[in-house]
Amino acid sequence: MSPTTGAKHPAPSSRPRKPATREANRRADGAATSTSPQNQGDPTLAVPSSAPRQGDPIPAGPTASKSTLHRKILAWYDANQRDLPWREPDCPPWHILISEIMLQQTPVNRVLPVWREWVERWPTPKHLAAEGPGEAIRAWGRLGYPRRALRLHAAAQAIVERHGGEVPTDHTELLALPGIGSYTAAAVASFAFGQRHAVLDTNVRRVFARTVTGIEYPPTAVTAAETRLATELLPSHDARAARWAVAVMELGALVCTARSPKCGDCPVSDQCAWLRAGSPAHSGPARKGQAWAGTDRQIRGALLAALRKSREPLSHPQLVIEVPDSALREPTQRGRCLSGLIEDGLVEPLPGQRYQLPE
DNA sequence: GAGCCGTGGCG
DNA sequence: TCGCCAAGGCT
Protein backbone atom coordinates (compact mmCIF):
# COMPACT_ATOMS: atom_id res chain seq x y z
CA MET A 1 0.00 0.00 0.00
CA SER A 2 2.98 2.32 -0.02
CA PRO A 3 3.06 4.99 -2.68
CA THR A 4 5.58 4.41 -5.39
CA THR A 5 8.63 6.58 -5.45
CA GLY A 6 8.60 9.06 -8.23
CA ALA A 7 12.25 9.72 -8.91
CA LYS A 8 13.48 6.19 -9.34
CA HIS A 9 13.34 6.09 -13.11
CA PRO A 10 14.21 8.83 -15.56
CA ALA A 11 11.47 9.76 -17.97
CA PRO A 12 12.45 8.20 -21.29
CA SER A 13 10.47 10.46 -23.51
CA SER A 14 10.14 14.16 -24.13
CA ARG A 15 6.62 13.85 -25.48
CA PRO A 16 3.86 15.66 -23.66
CA ARG A 17 2.53 13.50 -20.91
CA LYS A 18 1.58 13.37 -17.29
CA PRO A 19 3.63 15.10 -14.62
CA ALA A 20 6.79 13.10 -14.22
CA THR A 21 6.72 12.63 -10.51
CA ARG A 22 4.30 12.30 -7.68
CA GLU A 23 5.85 15.42 -6.25
CA ALA A 24 4.72 17.31 -9.30
CA ASN A 25 1.25 15.97 -8.71
CA ARG A 26 1.33 17.04 -5.11
CA ARG A 27 2.37 20.53 -6.14
CA ALA A 28 -0.45 20.63 -8.62
CA ASP A 29 -2.83 19.58 -5.88
CA GLY A 30 -1.51 22.16 -3.49
CA ALA A 31 -3.97 24.86 -4.42
CA ALA A 32 -6.76 23.12 -2.59
CA THR A 33 -8.32 25.15 0.13
CA SER A 34 -11.89 25.07 1.21
CA THR A 35 -12.13 28.69 2.11
CA SER A 36 -10.47 30.58 -0.69
CA PRO A 37 -12.69 33.03 -2.57
CA GLN A 38 -12.16 31.23 -5.83
CA ASN A 39 -14.26 28.37 -4.53
CA GLN A 40 -17.32 30.43 -3.87
CA GLY A 41 -18.78 29.63 -7.22
CA ASP A 42 -18.40 25.92 -6.80
CA PRO A 43 -21.47 23.77 -6.49
CA THR A 44 -21.91 22.75 -2.91
CA LEU A 45 -22.74 19.25 -1.90
CA ALA A 46 -25.66 18.48 0.32
CA VAL A 47 -28.32 15.88 0.85
CA PRO A 48 -30.84 15.90 -1.97
CA SER A 49 -34.29 16.57 -0.59
CA SER A 50 -36.25 13.87 -2.36
CA ALA A 51 -36.28 11.44 -5.25
CA PRO A 52 -32.73 12.15 -6.30
CA ARG A 53 -31.67 11.12 -9.71
CA GLN A 54 -28.13 10.67 -10.84
CA GLY A 55 -26.88 13.91 -12.26
CA ASP A 56 -29.41 16.22 -10.68
CA PRO A 57 -27.88 19.62 -10.11
CA ILE A 58 -26.00 19.77 -6.85
CA PRO A 59 -28.16 21.71 -4.41
CA ALA A 60 -26.69 24.55 -2.43
CA GLY A 61 -26.06 24.01 1.24
CA PRO A 62 -23.60 24.51 4.04
CA THR A 63 -22.59 20.89 4.39
CA ALA A 64 -19.45 20.42 2.34
CA SER A 65 -17.98 22.07 -0.69
CA LYS A 66 -16.63 20.57 -3.83
CA SER A 67 -13.12 21.46 -2.86
CA THR A 68 -13.55 19.61 0.42
CA LEU A 69 -14.53 16.52 -1.54
CA HIS A 70 -11.43 16.98 -3.67
CA ARG A 71 -9.13 17.45 -0.73
CA LYS A 72 -10.39 14.45 1.22
CA ILE A 73 -10.42 12.01 -1.66
CA LEU A 74 -7.03 13.12 -2.97
CA ALA A 75 -5.53 12.80 0.50
CA TRP A 76 -7.08 9.37 0.86
CA TYR A 77 -5.61 8.35 -2.47
CA ASP A 78 -2.15 9.54 -1.48
CA ALA A 79 -2.25 7.25 1.53
CA ASN A 80 -4.16 4.26 0.19
CA GLN A 81 -3.55 3.82 -3.52
CA ARG A 82 -2.46 0.45 -4.79
CA ASP A 83 1.03 0.18 -6.17
CA LEU A 84 0.13 -0.75 -9.74
CA PRO A 85 2.84 -0.82 -12.43
CA TRP A 86 0.85 1.19 -14.97
CA ARG A 87 0.72 4.00 -12.44
CA GLU A 88 4.49 4.35 -12.28
CA PRO A 89 5.40 7.92 -13.23
CA ASP A 90 7.45 6.82 -16.21
CA CYS A 91 5.07 4.19 -17.52
CA PRO A 92 4.85 4.75 -21.29
CA PRO A 93 1.45 5.77 -22.73
CA TRP A 94 1.37 2.60 -24.81
CA HIS A 95 1.68 0.45 -21.70
CA ILE A 96 -1.05 2.48 -20.02
CA LEU A 97 -3.26 2.01 -23.05
CA ILE A 98 -2.71 -1.75 -22.91
CA SER A 99 -3.65 -1.79 -19.25
CA GLU A 100 -6.85 0.13 -19.89
CA ILE A 101 -8.00 -2.26 -22.58
CA MET A 102 -7.18 -5.28 -20.44
CA LEU A 103 -8.95 -3.80 -17.44
CA GLN A 104 -12.20 -3.43 -19.35
CA GLN A 105 -14.42 -5.84 -17.44
CA THR A 106 -11.46 -7.80 -16.08
CA PRO A 107 -10.15 -7.58 -12.49
CA VAL A 108 -6.72 -6.16 -11.75
CA ASN A 109 -5.29 -9.35 -10.32
CA ARG A 110 -5.90 -11.29 -13.50
CA VAL A 111 -4.60 -8.49 -15.70
CA LEU A 112 -1.27 -8.01 -13.95
CA PRO A 113 0.67 -11.07 -15.18
CA VAL A 114 -0.62 -10.80 -18.75
CA TRP A 115 0.11 -7.08 -18.89
CA ARG A 116 3.71 -7.74 -17.83
CA GLU A 117 4.12 -10.27 -20.62
CA TRP A 118 2.67 -7.89 -23.18
CA VAL A 119 4.75 -4.85 -22.34
CA GLU A 120 7.91 -6.94 -22.30
CA ARG A 121 7.12 -8.62 -25.60
CA TRP A 122 5.60 -5.60 -27.35
CA PRO A 123 7.14 -2.52 -25.72
CA THR A 124 5.89 -0.23 -28.50
CA PRO A 125 2.89 -0.23 -30.85
CA LYS A 126 5.28 -0.97 -33.69
CA HIS A 127 6.33 -4.24 -32.08
CA LEU A 128 2.76 -5.46 -31.80
CA ALA A 129 1.73 -4.21 -35.22
CA ALA A 130 4.56 -6.21 -36.77
CA GLU A 131 2.99 -9.49 -35.70
CA GLY A 132 -0.17 -11.24 -36.82
CA PRO A 133 -3.37 -10.75 -34.84
CA GLY A 134 -3.31 -14.40 -33.81
CA GLU A 135 -0.31 -13.74 -31.61
CA ALA A 136 -2.24 -11.09 -29.75
CA ILE A 137 -5.19 -13.43 -29.33
CA ARG A 138 -2.96 -16.20 -28.03
CA ALA A 139 -1.09 -13.91 -25.65
CA TRP A 140 -4.41 -12.60 -24.38
CA GLY A 141 -4.75 -15.89 -22.55
CA ARG A 142 -7.90 -16.22 -20.50
CA LEU A 143 -8.59 -12.55 -19.84
CA GLY A 144 -11.92 -12.90 -21.61
CA TYR A 145 -13.56 -10.89 -24.38
CA PRO A 146 -10.81 -11.78 -26.85
CA ARG A 147 -12.09 -9.28 -29.37
CA ARG A 148 -10.29 -6.78 -27.18
CA ALA A 149 -7.00 -8.41 -28.17
CA LEU A 150 -7.93 -8.14 -31.82
CA ARG A 151 -8.88 -4.49 -31.47
CA LEU A 152 -5.74 -3.70 -29.50
CA HIS A 153 -3.71 -5.20 -32.31
CA ALA A 154 -5.67 -3.12 -34.81
CA ALA A 155 -5.13 -0.06 -32.63
CA ALA A 156 -1.38 -0.69 -32.70
CA GLN A 157 -1.49 -0.80 -36.48
CA ALA A 158 -3.53 2.39 -36.63
CA ILE A 159 -1.10 4.12 -34.28
CA VAL A 160 1.79 3.13 -36.52
CA GLU A 161 -0.01 4.17 -39.69
CA ARG A 162 -1.71 7.34 -38.53
CA HIS A 163 0.43 8.58 -35.67
CA GLY A 164 3.98 7.60 -36.49
CA GLY A 165 3.99 4.85 -33.90
CA GLU A 166 3.26 7.17 -30.96
CA VAL A 167 0.07 6.94 -28.94
CA PRO A 168 -1.88 10.10 -29.83
CA THR A 169 -2.38 12.61 -27.05
CA ASP A 170 -5.59 14.03 -28.43
CA HIS A 171 -8.83 12.71 -26.98
CA THR A 172 -10.61 12.68 -30.33
CA GLU A 173 -7.80 10.78 -31.98
CA LEU A 174 -7.74 8.28 -29.15
CA LEU A 175 -11.49 7.82 -29.50
CA ALA A 176 -11.04 6.99 -33.18
CA LEU A 177 -8.84 3.99 -32.41
CA PRO A 178 -10.37 0.49 -32.46
CA GLY A 179 -11.55 -0.72 -29.06
CA ILE A 180 -11.24 2.71 -27.48
CA GLY A 181 -14.53 4.21 -26.41
CA SER A 182 -15.55 7.11 -24.27
CA TYR A 183 -14.10 5.79 -21.03
CA THR A 184 -10.77 4.55 -22.37
CA ALA A 185 -10.08 7.68 -24.42
CA ALA A 186 -10.60 9.84 -21.36
CA ALA A 187 -8.60 7.47 -19.16
CA VAL A 188 -5.56 7.41 -21.46
CA ALA A 189 -5.68 11.16 -22.04
CA SER A 190 -5.88 11.67 -18.30
CA PHE A 191 -3.56 8.98 -16.92
CA ALA A 192 -0.93 8.98 -19.65
CA PHE A 193 -0.93 12.65 -20.62
CA GLY A 194 -2.20 14.41 -17.52
CA GLN A 195 -5.14 16.03 -19.26
CA ARG A 196 -8.42 17.13 -17.76
CA HIS A 197 -11.27 14.80 -18.74
CA ALA A 198 -14.34 13.36 -17.09
CA VAL A 199 -13.34 9.72 -16.62
CA LEU A 200 -16.58 7.86 -16.09
CA ASP A 201 -16.11 4.21 -15.33
CA THR A 202 -18.28 1.97 -13.22
CA ASN A 203 -16.36 2.88 -10.05
CA VAL A 204 -16.62 6.62 -10.55
CA ARG A 205 -20.28 6.39 -11.44
CA ARG A 206 -20.99 4.44 -8.28
CA VAL A 207 -19.07 6.86 -6.05
CA PHE A 208 -20.92 9.85 -7.48
CA ALA A 209 -24.27 8.06 -7.35
CA ARG A 210 -23.82 7.49 -3.63
CA THR A 211 -21.95 10.51 -2.36
CA VAL A 212 -23.66 13.15 -4.48
CA THR A 213 -26.94 11.82 -5.78
CA GLY A 214 -27.82 9.62 -2.83
CA ILE A 215 -28.63 6.41 -4.66
CA GLU A 216 -26.94 3.04 -4.29
CA TYR A 217 -26.28 2.32 -7.95
CA PRO A 218 -26.02 4.46 -11.07
CA PRO A 219 -28.36 3.93 -14.04
CA THR A 220 -27.68 1.07 -16.41
CA ALA A 221 -26.22 3.27 -19.12
CA VAL A 222 -24.23 6.46 -18.71
CA THR A 223 -26.60 9.43 -18.87
CA ALA A 224 -25.94 12.96 -20.02
CA ALA A 225 -26.64 14.06 -16.49
CA GLU A 226 -23.87 11.86 -15.14
CA THR A 227 -21.42 13.26 -17.65
CA ARG A 228 -22.47 16.75 -16.67
CA LEU A 229 -22.01 15.99 -13.00
CA ALA A 230 -18.59 14.40 -13.52
CA THR A 231 -17.52 17.42 -15.55
CA GLU A 232 -18.75 19.85 -12.91
CA LEU A 233 -16.82 18.01 -10.24
CA LEU A 234 -13.57 18.07 -12.20
CA PRO A 235 -10.84 20.19 -10.62
CA SER A 236 -9.81 23.13 -12.75
CA HIS A 237 -6.18 22.31 -13.32
CA ASP A 238 -5.08 19.50 -15.59
CA ALA A 239 -2.73 17.66 -13.27
CA ARG A 240 -5.10 17.87 -10.34
CA ALA A 241 -8.02 16.74 -12.49
CA ALA A 242 -6.05 13.75 -13.71
CA ARG A 243 -5.15 12.78 -10.18
CA TRP A 244 -8.75 13.28 -9.10
CA ALA A 245 -9.93 10.90 -11.80
CA VAL A 246 -7.73 8.04 -10.69
CA ALA A 247 -8.40 8.81 -7.03
CA VAL A 248 -12.17 8.53 -7.38
CA MET A 249 -11.78 5.33 -9.35
CA GLU A 250 -9.57 3.90 -6.64
CA LEU A 251 -12.03 4.88 -3.94
CA GLY A 252 -14.75 3.05 -5.82
CA ALA A 253 -12.56 0.01 -6.33
CA LEU A 254 -11.35 -0.31 -2.74
CA VAL A 255 -13.92 1.33 -0.45
CA CYS A 256 -17.12 2.32 -2.22
CA THR A 257 -17.55 -1.16 -3.64
CA ALA A 258 -20.64 -2.50 -5.32
CA ARG A 259 -21.67 -5.09 -2.77
CA SER A 260 -20.28 -4.37 0.68
CA PRO A 261 -19.05 -0.80 0.79
CA LYS A 262 -16.57 -0.10 3.57
CA CYS A 263 -18.15 3.13 4.69
CA GLY A 264 -16.13 3.03 7.88
CA ASP A 265 -12.98 3.51 5.82
CA CYS A 266 -14.41 6.16 3.53
CA PRO A 267 -12.91 9.64 3.68
CA VAL A 268 -16.18 11.27 2.65
CA SER A 269 -18.69 9.16 4.55
CA ASP A 270 -19.60 12.24 6.58
CA GLN A 271 -20.94 13.91 3.47
CA CYS A 272 -22.30 10.91 1.59
CA ALA A 273 -25.85 11.57 0.48
CA TRP A 274 -26.69 7.87 0.25
CA LEU A 275 -25.38 7.12 3.75
CA ARG A 276 -27.23 10.07 5.22
CA ALA A 277 -30.42 8.92 3.61
CA GLY A 278 -30.05 5.66 5.50
CA SER A 279 -28.46 3.65 2.71
CA PRO A 280 -31.74 3.01 0.89
CA ALA A 281 -31.83 -0.11 -1.22
CA HIS A 282 -31.60 0.17 -4.98
CA SER A 283 -35.03 1.07 -6.30
CA GLY A 284 -34.48 0.62 -9.99
CA PRO A 285 -34.89 -2.56 -12.01
CA ALA A 286 -32.73 -5.49 -10.98
CA ARG A 287 -29.54 -5.59 -12.95
CA LYS A 288 -29.80 -8.51 -15.26
CA GLY A 289 -27.13 -11.10 -14.89
CA GLN A 290 -25.56 -12.68 -17.90
CA ALA A 291 -26.53 -16.24 -18.67
CA TRP A 292 -23.61 -18.50 -19.22
CA ALA A 293 -24.25 -22.25 -19.36
CA GLY A 294 -25.08 -23.33 -22.86
CA THR A 295 -24.72 -19.87 -24.36
CA ASP A 296 -22.87 -19.01 -27.51
CA ARG A 297 -20.25 -17.29 -25.45
CA GLN A 298 -19.42 -20.48 -23.63
CA ILE A 299 -19.04 -22.33 -26.90
CA ARG A 300 -17.03 -19.55 -28.49
CA GLY A 301 -14.75 -19.48 -25.49
CA ALA A 302 -14.18 -23.22 -25.65
CA LEU A 303 -13.47 -23.18 -29.38
CA LEU A 304 -11.04 -20.31 -29.08
CA ALA A 305 -9.34 -21.84 -26.06
CA ALA A 306 -8.62 -24.94 -28.12
CA LEU A 307 -7.11 -22.88 -30.92
CA ARG A 308 -5.05 -20.83 -28.50
CA LYS A 309 -3.59 -23.97 -27.04
CA SER A 310 -2.57 -25.46 -30.36
CA ARG A 311 0.26 -24.17 -32.49
CA GLU A 312 -1.08 -26.18 -35.40
CA PRO A 313 -4.40 -25.71 -37.21
CA LEU A 314 -7.18 -27.90 -35.81
CA SER A 315 -9.58 -30.01 -37.80
CA HIS A 316 -13.28 -29.74 -37.24
CA PRO A 317 -13.44 -32.99 -35.21
CA GLN A 318 -10.56 -31.83 -33.05
CA LEU A 319 -12.44 -28.64 -32.39
CA VAL A 320 -15.66 -30.44 -31.51
CA ILE A 321 -13.90 -32.43 -28.82
CA GLU A 322 -13.14 -29.23 -26.97
CA VAL A 323 -16.68 -27.96 -26.57
CA PRO A 324 -18.62 -28.85 -23.42
CA ASP A 325 -20.83 -31.92 -23.40
CA SER A 326 -23.96 -29.86 -23.16
CA ALA A 327 -23.24 -28.40 -26.54
CA LEU A 328 -22.08 -31.56 -28.28
CA ARG A 329 -25.63 -32.31 -29.27
CA GLU A 330 -26.04 -28.90 -30.82
CA PRO A 331 -24.13 -28.82 -34.09
CA THR A 332 -26.26 -25.89 -35.17
CA GLN A 333 -25.05 -23.79 -32.28
CA ARG A 334 -21.49 -24.94 -32.77
CA GLY A 335 -21.58 -23.96 -36.40
CA ARG A 336 -23.06 -20.60 -35.58
CA CYS A 337 -20.34 -19.93 -33.04
CA LEU A 338 -17.54 -20.96 -35.35
CA SER A 339 -18.97 -18.78 -38.10
CA GLY A 340 -19.26 -15.93 -35.68
CA LEU A 341 -15.64 -16.28 -34.61
CA ILE A 342 -14.58 -16.25 -38.25
CA GLU A 343 -16.72 -13.20 -38.97
CA ASP A 344 -15.18 -11.46 -36.00
CA GLY A 345 -11.71 -12.20 -37.32
CA LEU A 346 -10.82 -14.30 -34.31
CA VAL A 347 -10.55 -17.53 -36.29
CA GLU A 348 -9.16 -18.16 -39.74
CA PRO A 349 -10.65 -20.98 -41.82
CA LEU A 350 -8.28 -23.10 -43.88
CA PRO A 351 -8.97 -25.53 -46.73
CA GLY A 352 -10.15 -28.96 -45.60
CA GLN A 353 -12.26 -27.96 -42.59
CA ARG A 354 -9.27 -26.80 -40.64
CA TYR A 355 -9.02 -23.73 -38.48
CA GLN A 356 -6.39 -21.59 -36.79
CA LEU A 357 -5.89 -18.23 -35.13
CA PRO A 358 -5.53 -15.52 -37.80
CA GLU A 359 -2.06 -14.99 -39.26
C1' DG B 1 -30.78 1.40 -26.55
C1' DA B 2 -30.88 -3.27 -25.61
C1' DG B 3 -28.22 -7.26 -26.51
C1' DC B 4 -24.04 -9.39 -27.10
C1' DC B 5 -19.32 -10.45 -26.13
C1' DG B 6 -15.36 -14.38 -21.69
C1' DT B 7 -13.72 -15.64 -17.51
C1' DG B 8 -13.10 -16.47 -12.75
C1' DG B 9 -13.50 -15.21 -7.89
C1' DC B 10 -16.13 -14.02 -4.09
C1' DG B 11 -19.98 -13.15 -0.56
C1' DT C 1 -24.03 -23.05 -3.94
C1' DC C 2 -24.67 -19.61 -7.35
C1' DG C 3 -25.81 -15.09 -8.69
C1' DC C 4 -23.31 -10.99 -8.94
C1' DC C 5 -19.69 -8.46 -10.48
C1' DA C 6 -15.05 -6.76 -12.62
C1' DA C 7 -11.00 0.28 -15.18
C1' DG C 8 -16.47 -1.18 -21.65
C1' DG C 9 -17.14 -1.18 -26.57
C1' DC C 10 -19.72 -2.11 -30.54
C1' DT C 11 -23.80 -3.03 -33.32
Image (tube, coloured by chain):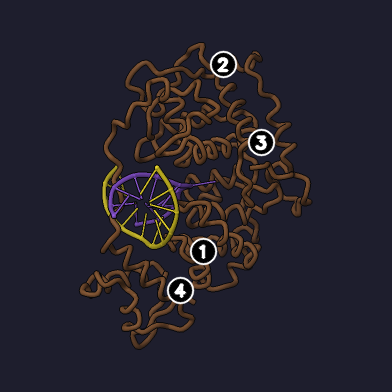
Chain colours: A brown, B yellow, C purple
Q: How far from the left and from the top, in percent, is residue A332?
A: 22, 72
Nearest-to-viewer mark from 3 and 4: 4
The type of residue carrying mark 3 is Ala
- Numbered circle sitting on residue A308: 4
Foreground: A90 or A197? A90
What chain letter is assigned to the residue under label 3? Answer: A
The type of residue carrying mark 4 is Arg
Real-space Cα separation, disc 3 to disc 1, in angstroms: 30 Å
What residue is disc 2 on? A41
Real-space Cα separation, disc 3 to disc 4, in angstroms: 41 Å
What chain letter is assigned to the residue under label 1? Answer: A
What chain letter is assigned to the residue under label 2? Answer: A
Estimate how packed mark 4 is, as few (under 14), some (14 to 19) or many (20 or more) residues with alpha carbons within 10 Å. Answer: many
Looking at the image, residue A148 lies above or below residue A282? below
Q: Earlier in the sequence, mark 2 or mark 1?
A: 2
Real-space Cα separation, disc 2 to disc 4, in angstroms: 56 Å
**Residue A294 left/right relative to A133:** left
